[in-house]
Amino acid sequence: MESVKEKSFDELVEHFLGLSLPQHLAGGVTLSNLPGDAQDFILRMLALMKHAGCSTRNFNSILILWLSFTIPNMLPRAWGGRIPPITIPGRHKKLDDFIAKMELTPGKKPLVFVDIGCGFPPVTTADTAQRFPDWQIIGVDRSFSDYVLYNKNKNYACYNQKDGFQYFQAQQGSTSPALYEDPKTTRKLLDQLFKDLLPLLENLNSLESETVEKDGSRLIKNHIRDFETDNLRFIKSEVINLKLQPAKVCRIMNMLIYFKPDIRKQLLHQAGELLDDDGIIIAGTNGLGAQSRYAIYQKEGDGLFPSQFAFSLDNLGHLAVMPWFTIHKDDPEAMLLAECSRAIRSDQSFWPEFRNRLDELLMDHEICQRKTDKYLHFPKEIMPFDKYLEKGFIIWHAMQKEGYADRAIDALVRAGFTAWKNPVGDIAVKPPADCSLF
């Protein structure tokens, strides 16, 4: 491993994927300029890409940009070792749809939904509470920030009374590199704004929410209180200390990925202790409402068993980054996704047509174009990130409508998987007997 880490990024790509990068991409990532955890991330990513049967032609300028700027600022080291609470409204809509299709009806007591690691601000937990007004929704996290600061551009930062600055995020959950290219300057500006607004608060010792505003910026104290409703409450706690009414559903999204396998299994077991006899756990990760991968665990008797592993079709995309997003080596969900991807990519009755149709849609929507060198090329002026996301959803809706998810499932069946389309349209497989999901 040490000899591998001594190579340049370009050499690593060739080492893992077999071809050198073309001239317009070569030199795009300088490993020596990246912190150690980002370098380790790239090694894990390339190993996963190899496992998934990807070629060097999966690389493009957008992925290079993510590796250079965005990924280093999404890792815990950038936030003092904390799990970054990256969030956006609607991020878990599909998972809420999954629960809705189970057609569970509350009895004399409301059904309980526990959102473990709900993050802060807990906008996705609030989404779930609105979706299921007859349920009791409980958001759980080990910490909730004391203050949230919104600048005039609606970027926000979290602060604590004791520890000060914790985290900042771009408007509406965007991970555009613009805000992160100079994080020291960004934080300096936010810190000064926080110092300007903090003295305007009147009740620093109160546990209630309070908001002050100045020149288009806002500082909110105890913002967690603003999210509570008749069917939504929040508990600051470690999972092991929770004592709750048995839950029908536990959701653990974008959290387990940060823990080593032994701790991950322990957390799953503890979450299973919170479930009703036939309850389920939904655990996995996704991007900003896209590129999701997740497992459904069913409680049966005294045991907890993975009943399905599912992933969205866009994980097979040319511009996808979340399939390769891991924090620890041999992440079980990422490894199983890579195995499924390899089977699909190897299917010559499906993959060439899928790849060509996706190329057509990317070109039609003026995102990028595959040229004679067989690599994707982007316009000199990259479109705004929110526009890119919007067009991405349109493209994948079209791919889904044209039946490519069904055909990917057929490819998995031909490769020996037990596969089907789950109730929300994602590709699902029965985890193999030797799978280490749990």
Image (spheres, helix red, strand yellow):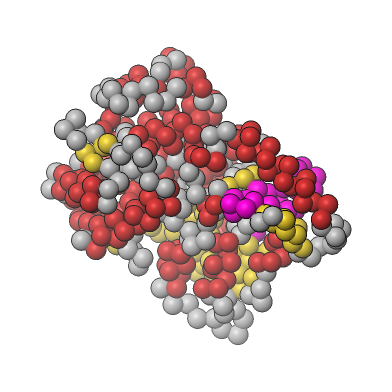
| Residue shown at 78% from the left, 45% from the top | 195
Q: Position of residue 48 (x, y in %)?
A: 37, 35
Q: The N terminus appears in which quarter of the rendering?
A: top left
| Residue shown at 64% from the left, 44% from the top | 167
Q: Residue reaching furthest left?
A: 349
144 within the magenta span: yes
What are the residue bounds of the magenta stretch? 140-164
Q: Position of residue 326 (x, y in %)?
A: 47, 39
Closer to the camera, 28 or 128?
28
Tell me how many marks there are. 0
Q: Residue reaching furthest bottom?
A: 108
Query: In screen coordinates, is 321 left or right of 69?
Result: left
| Residue shown at 55% from the left, 62% from the top | 124
- Using the rendered view, name the quadrant where residue 14 is placed: top left
Q: Position of residue 214 (x, y in %)?
A: 72, 56
The answer to whether residue 387 shows anywhere in this view is yes
Picture layout, residue 433 above or below residue 189: below
Q: Position of residue 102 (x, y in %)?
A: 43, 73
- Using the rendered view, name the quadrant where residue 58 is placed: top left
The answer to whether residue 246 shows anywhere in this view is no
| Residue shown at 17% from the left, 46% from the top | 356
56 within the magenta span: no
Picture layout, residue 285 above or below residue 212: above
